[in-house]
Image: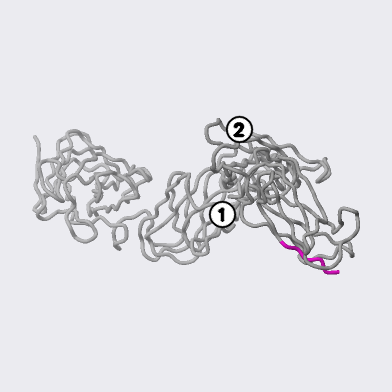
Amino acid sequence: MVIGICLVIGICLLAIPQPAAAVTITVKMDGTHQVIKDNVGTALATGDAIQIIYASGGTPNPPDSGGGATGGDSIIWAGHVGDGGLGSGAFIKVFAGGQSLTDGARIYVRGWNNSSFLASTYYGDSELSATLEAGEPPMPIEWSVPTFETSSSTAGLAGNTPLGYDVQVNLNGVSVVFSEVTKEGNTYIVSSEEGPDLPGSFGFLGKYFNISTTAFHSGTIEVSLPYNDYGLSIAEEQQLKLEQYDGLNKVWNDITTTVETTSNIISGETSHLSYFAIVTTAPTLEWVEINGMPFHSGDVISAHSDVAVRLSDEKGVSTVELKVEDTGSPPSYIHFTFDPSDHPPSSTFEGTWKGSFMIHRGKSRTVPLHFSAGNSAGVLKDYPVYLGRVVGGAVTVVGRAYNYPNPFKPMSGGTTNIQYVLSQDATITLVIYDITGHEVKRMRFGSGTAGGRGGTNQVAWNGQSIGGDIVGNGMYLYKIISGDEVIGSGKLVVFD
C-alpha cells in the first residue's frame, strides 16, 4: 500500500514501502506560498537554474565554480524555474525512484538568478527543518521549503564565504583564507592570460588570478596559488614570487610568504583582494642602441642597422632575439651574440648583445621591432614593441641639427658632437665655416656609414681646422650637404 501526504505549505511527499531509509519524494514550489526570489524580492524568471541537493552531512556546502556539489553533497536533480508547467519562481519535480538517505541527511533547494550553474552568478539555499534518522521506517517526513532569495550578499543566505574565523574558500585549486569574515558572501576567482602589465624584469608563470569577494572581512587574507614546475629546478622554484596588483598606484607588490616545492603551491599574505600573478625573474632590458646611438620607439632607422642591447639577469642571459616585421616581407628573426669586450666572456649575467638587420627603403612606414630574451632557467620575456620609422622620398634632415656641448673648449681638449637625423642612408658632406664664410673644416661620410646612415648620426669635431690648427674663439656655422643640396645647418661656439 502507498501512503501519501500533501502538506499545507505546498510540499507533497509520497512514501513507498521499501527498505528503511529510502523514500520517493515530490518537491513542489507552487508559486503561492513557496517562491524563489532574487535579492531585490522579484520572483526568479522562468528558465533560471534550480538544483535539489542531498547533503549527507546535514549542512549544505557551497557550489564549486561550475555549480557542482562539494563537500560530499550530491545533486539529485537540476532543472529550471517553470519546470512542471508552473510560472515564475516555482517548479515541480517528482523523483521516480528511491533516494537513500543517511542519518541526519537533508534535502535542500538551491536557486540561481541565472540560467547557468556558475558561482559567478548569485545563488541562495533553502533552509530545511527536518532530518531523517537512520533506521526509521519509510513514512511521511515534514520537509519545509520556505520562500528564499538568491543573493551574493544578503545576510542569512548560504554563500561560499560564511561568517567566522580562518574561513577558507577553495576554488579550482586556489585557496583564499580570511582571518575573519564579519558578513558572509561569495568569493570569486577568475583566471585569465590577460591582466595588468608586469614590469619588464618579470617573467610570467601561468595565468593572472582576479580574486574578489562580496563578504565583509577584517584582518589578513592568505592567498595560495598552484603552479607548474615543468623545467624549473628546486632552486628556481624557491625564487618564484607571488605578486599582487595595486590598482591605485598602478604597481605590483611582492606578497610572498612561502613556496611549497613539493606540492607546487605558492602563498602570500595581504589585506585586500585584486589581481595576483606568479612571476620569476626574466632578463632586464636596460637599453637599445641602433648604429651606436640610443634608440627609442618612433626613431628613424637605416636600411642597414647594427643593433646592440644591454641586458642583465641574475640567472644568466641565454638567448636574445629580434623579430623585424617589415611591410610586404616575411618576418626576419635575428639572433644576437654576446659581446665579450663589454664584460668578461665567462659571465653572461650582465652585458651587451649585438646583431644587425636590413630593410628595403621604399615608401614611408613604421617597422615593428620585437625584442625577446631568455635566461638559463628557461624563462622567456617579450619586451614592449619598438617602432622604427622609415622615411621615403628624397633624403632630408628630420627635425633640426644641433651640437653639444655648445660652447665648447678645444684648446682644453674639448670636443663638440654635431647630431642630426637622416631620413635615409645617403652620402653626406659636413662643412664648417667661420663667421666670414671661410671654410675651416670639411668631413665626408659614405652612404650607410656613421654620419651617412638613416636615423640618428653623431659627428665629433675637436676644433681643428683643415690645416690641423685649433680654431679661435667665436661663432661658427655648419652645413649638412647631400649631393649639391644643403639639407641641414646649425651654429656652434668656441670659447676657451
Magenta stretch, main secondary structure, is strand
Q: CA distance from mark 1 to mark 2?
A: 35 Å
Query: Is residue 284 left or right of 60 when viewed as pictured?
Result: right
Q: Position of residue 366 (x, y in %)?
A: 55, 43
Query: Is residue 27 left or right of 320 when viewed as pictured?
Result: left
Q: The residue under label 2 is which amino acid type?
A: Ser
Front position in the image: 149 or 45: 45
State the SS at label 2.
Answer: strand
Q: Position of residue 15 (x, y in %)?
A: 14, 40
Query: How many numbered tags mark residues here?
Result: 2
Q: Which span is picked out in magenta?
A: 491-496
Q: Is residue 404 above or below residue 380?
A: below
Where residue 338 sits, quadrant-wise, is: top right
State the SS at label 1.
Answer: strand
Query: Is residue 124 left or right of 456 when viewed as pictured?
Result: left
Decide which of tag 1 and tag 2 comes sooner along the chain.
Answer: 1
Residue depicted at x 57% and y 45%: 385
| Residue 285 visible in the current orientation | no
- Which residue, given by chain and number where applicable, does mark 2 sit on? 332
Where residue 37 sits, quadrant-wise, is: bottom left
Q: The residue under label 1 is which amino acid type?
A: Glu
Bin the neighbour count of mark 1 within 10 Å (Cα to Cα): few under 14, some 14-19, many 20 and up: many
From the image, which quarter does the C terminus lie in?
bottom right
Residue depicted at x 82% and y 59%: 415
- Which residue, given by chain and number where applicable, does mark 1 sit on? 243
Front position in the image: 24 or 93: 93
